[in-house]
Each structure stands twice: as C-alpha cells, then as structure tokens.
Image (cartoon, rainbow, N blue to C red):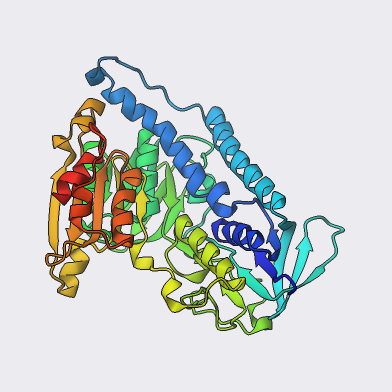
C-alpha cells in the first residue's frame, strides 16, 4: 500500500506535531512554512513573551531577597542583551525542531502554500526566481495561525502605538504604557512592563480583568496589580487613539482619556485564512475567517483539516499541538472512532503573571451558571511550608469536584509555579480521578503541590 501523501501549510505547533506524528507512522509528509519552524509561538508569542517575563521575574526576586537573608539590587533590563536572549531561545527551538523533522523524513519547503483544489497544493518557495511547485495530496492540513487584531481606529506605528509583536522586546522601555485589553495577553503585558519599571495603566472594557475567568481568580490578580501601583480603568471601552511626538492619548467611549508615553493593543487576534485558496477547494470559513472543524479537525471537505488558531478552537499552543497529533493519527488511519476526539473542556491553561494563574476543567462560576451541584475546596499557599521557605505565599488552590462521586471536575491555582502545578489537577480531570486519589498520593514534602493535596482532603 502506497504511503499517504500529507501536505501541511503552516509550521506552528499544530503543523509540526502533525508532521512528526504522521511521518513516524509512514506518511510522506511535506511541510510548508514561510517564516520559522515553530510558527508564531516561537517567533512572536509564547516563547518570546515568557522569556521576557522570566527576565522581569529577577526584579520580583530582588524585591523579596532581603526577607530571604540576602539583599539583591535590581537593575533595569539591558534591551540589547534581552533581545539577543529572546532571539537565541527562539532560534535554538526552531533549529532543533527543524532538524528533528528532517531526520524523520519530513520535506520542508520555505515559502507559502495555497489550495489549488481539494487534492493539490501550490507551494511557492522563497526567493525571487523560485518557481511554483504543485503538490499532490491525499490529505491536507491548514495550520496558518492568527495575527493580532487591529481595529480601524488604531493607527499602529510600531513606535508608540504597538501590538504585542512589537514588544519582543520593544525599542525602549515605555515610561508609561497604556495597555488596551484585559484578557490573558493584556494582563501578561501589564505584569511584564511593570516588572521592567514602566508605569502601567490597563483599560478594562468590563468590570474585572480576565472576564472569562473565575471572579475570585481575577480579584487576586487585580489585588496584586493595585499593590504594584498599576492603574485599572474599568468599564472603559477604547474607541480611538491620538499620538504626538511625546505621548499617546487613548479615548474611551464614556469620555475618559488616558494619556501615556506608549499604548499597546491586546484585544484578540484574527485568523490567517486569506490567501489560502479556500474557495478553490470548497472549504468553508465563517464570517470571522475561522475554518470550522468537526471532532477530528476535518473541515467540510473530509480530506482537508484545520488546526491551531485557524480552527477557531482554544487558542493555546498545547491544544494546537494535540490537534496536530490527532489529525495525523486520523490521516494515517490509526483511528476513526468518535470517542478519540479532543475534549477542549479539559484543556489546562496558564497566565504568566505574578503570581501565575492556571486553571482546568469546570470553574465554580460556570457550574453556578449551569445550576450544577459541586463541591469547592480552597486552600491558601500561606499554610504551605515550601511557599513560606520561598518567601512567596501569595495565592491559593481551588478544587472543584462532584459532591456525590468525588470525581475531580476542575480547579484553579493562583500562585508561584501555577503553570506547573495545574498538571496534577489536569491529569485528574482528564482521567476522571477522585479527590481521594490525589489526597492518598504520597507527594514530596515540603513542596507547593502539598496545597493541592490539602485541597483534595
């Protein structure tokens, strides 16, 4: 039997995981990527932002170092060194991923790709003299990601009016940054630039930061922001911007005006679906430009799949990578049963503020809205020995379970290393474990994970 011909447009988390998995199972894989292997996650989003946040964390350590018995002094970041660090991490990750894919037999084309029809892809390699390559495909994956959303009223110039991709790192540390957007990306940038010493104002269109998160979690982050002297402008919907040589003014719908040295837009993203030739293959996109998919990530054309941000599902690198894996398994015929599909409701997510925030599964507020009976237990890190040893006892663990069966339904963590700790709860949610399964586990002591066990008890 001939090997499956699998063509992937987009080398982000969905594309590279699909390529690696399909190649391991004998498929003939061609991956088309116009920028870097690893996609926006490596180049502009996840990795660079977290690398900068880690640098900013040095200041937090310095601030509490005296309580740990050694006083450190924080300096402002060296932007050239920081830029080199961010670039080095991204380049190393991209090179190692590319070497791995090539070693597995994946053909990589640097350039752009678009659908010619439902079984052919046109690849245009980079270079002025490059000629089009017509690739025949049994299956095609579209995984071109998304770009920051820029409203018509925002004259983004990359100098004083920025989108997130201008800030890895910025050309200067803003004296006063006005962040527009209080979702995950917005609050991470608030934390990041505050840790670099900028004065920060956050324009919040609703009455709390992180409007999609547990209100108690959002309140904990707001408290930390206020203690860090971040200005929270609530119920303020930005409608226009005006900049001059020295400042940017943000005008809100209710008449309020916030003036800073720079403004940063963090108000979501738009899918990168234009130019893909969807119409040539009959692939349907919705009004927002996302390509709807079924439980196997198939589009309305069964042999054409969509993954990552383009699919309109959870915009998380971890979700995109898992989609890529599941798509590849489906393409090579490892499974076709419905029960193998992804359960997006059980995806863990994290926000790399300080303290960190992470959650998974059912939230308390969501259960309340659904009228679902739950049991909620909450334990603060202030009672944990390791948190006291580390000098950072902020935050808590909240565990949501079924009151009848004890099955863990979800959880939230606010505190140091929340992004790592949530894995314990995520595994419990995924495997339908009970709170007793966590409570009876013999965990390390002293360790922050002890708070999870305490919540389970």
In this rendering, the count of numbered labels is 0
Please report the residue visible at 66 percent of the width from the left and 43 percent of the height from the top: 95
| Vertical placement of residue 386 versus 28, above or below | above
Q: Position of residue 35 (x, y in %)?
A: 67, 53
Q: Position of residue 454 (x, y in %)?
A: 15, 44
Name the side, left or right, on which 457 lies relative to 152: left
Please report the residue visible at 71 percent of the width from the left and 49 percent of the height from the top: 103
Judge by depth and name the residue closer to the eye, 24 or 393: 24
Q: Position of residue 104 (x, y in %)?
A: 69, 53
Q: Quadrant of the N terminus?
A: bottom right
| Vertical placement of residue 10 versus 197, above or below | below
| Vertical placement of residue 205 versus 373, above or below | above
Residue 197 in sight here: no
Q: Residue furthest top?
A: 70
Q: Position of residue 153 (x, y in %)?
A: 46, 63
The answer to which quarter of the image holds residue 360 is bottom left
Name the side, left or right, on which 200 lies relative to 393: right
Please report the residue visible at 15 percent of the width from the left and 68 percent of the height from the top: 368
Judge by depth and name the residue closer to the eye, 167 or 16: 16
Residue 402 in sight here: yes
Judge by depth and name the residue closer to the eye, 452 or 8: 452
């Amino acid at each position: 039997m001939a090997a499956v011909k699998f063509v992937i447009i987009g080398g982000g988390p969905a594309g590279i995981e699909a390529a690696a998995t399909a190649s391991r199972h004998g498929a003939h894989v061609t991956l088309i990527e116009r920028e870097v292997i690893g996609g926006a996650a490596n180049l502009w989003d996840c990795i660079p932002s977290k690398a900068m946040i880690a640098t900013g964390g040095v200041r937090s350590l310095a601030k509490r170092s005296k309580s740990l018995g050694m006083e450190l002094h924080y300096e402002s970041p060296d932007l050239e060194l920081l830029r080199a660090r961010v670039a080095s991490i991204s380049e190393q990750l991209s090179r190692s991923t590319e070497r791995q894919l090539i070693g597995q037999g994946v053909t990589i084309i640097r350039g752009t790709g678009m659908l010619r029809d439902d079984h052919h892809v046109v690849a245009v390699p980079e270079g002025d003299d490059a000629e089009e390559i017509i690739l025949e495909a049994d299956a095609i994956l579209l995984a071109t990601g998304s770009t920051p959303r820029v409203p018509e009223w925002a004259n983004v110039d990359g100098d004083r009016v920025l989108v997130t991709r201008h800030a890895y790192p910025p050309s200067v540390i803003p004296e006063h940054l006005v962040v527009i957007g209080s979702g995950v990306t917005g609050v991470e940038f608030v934390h990041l630039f505050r840790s670099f010493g900028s004065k920060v104002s956050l324009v919040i269109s609703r009455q709390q930061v992180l409007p999609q998160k547990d209100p108690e979690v959002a309140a904990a982050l707001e408290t930390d922001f206020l203690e860090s002297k971040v200005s929270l402008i609530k119920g303020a919907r930005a409608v226009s911007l005006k900049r001059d040589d020295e400042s940017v003014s943000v005008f809100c719908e209710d008449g309020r005006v916030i003036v800073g040295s720079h403004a940063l837009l963090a108000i979501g993203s738009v899918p990168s679906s234009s130019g893909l030739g969807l119409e040539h293959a009959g692939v349907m996109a919705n009004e927002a430009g996302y390509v709807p998919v079924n439980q196997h990530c198939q589009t309305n054309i069964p042999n054409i799949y969509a993954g990552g941000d383009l699919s309109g599902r959870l915009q998380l690198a971890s979700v995109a990578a898992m989609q890529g894996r599941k798509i590849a398994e489906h393409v090579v015929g490892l499974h076709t049963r419905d029960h193998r599909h992804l359960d997006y409701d059980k995806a863990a997510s994290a926000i790399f503020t300080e303290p960190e925030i992470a959650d998974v599964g059912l939230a308390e507020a969501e259960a309340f809205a659904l009228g679902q009976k739950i049991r909620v237990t909450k334990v603060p890190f202030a009672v944990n020995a390791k948190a006291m040893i580390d000098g950072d006892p902020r935050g808590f663990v909240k565990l949501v379970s079924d009151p009848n069966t004890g099955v863990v339904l979800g959880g939230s963590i606010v505190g140091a290393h929340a992004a790592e700790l949530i894995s314990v709860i995520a595994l419990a949610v995924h495997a339908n474990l009970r709170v007793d399964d966590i409570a009876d586990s013999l965990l390390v002591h002293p360790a922050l994970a002890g708070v999870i066990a305490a919540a389970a008890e």
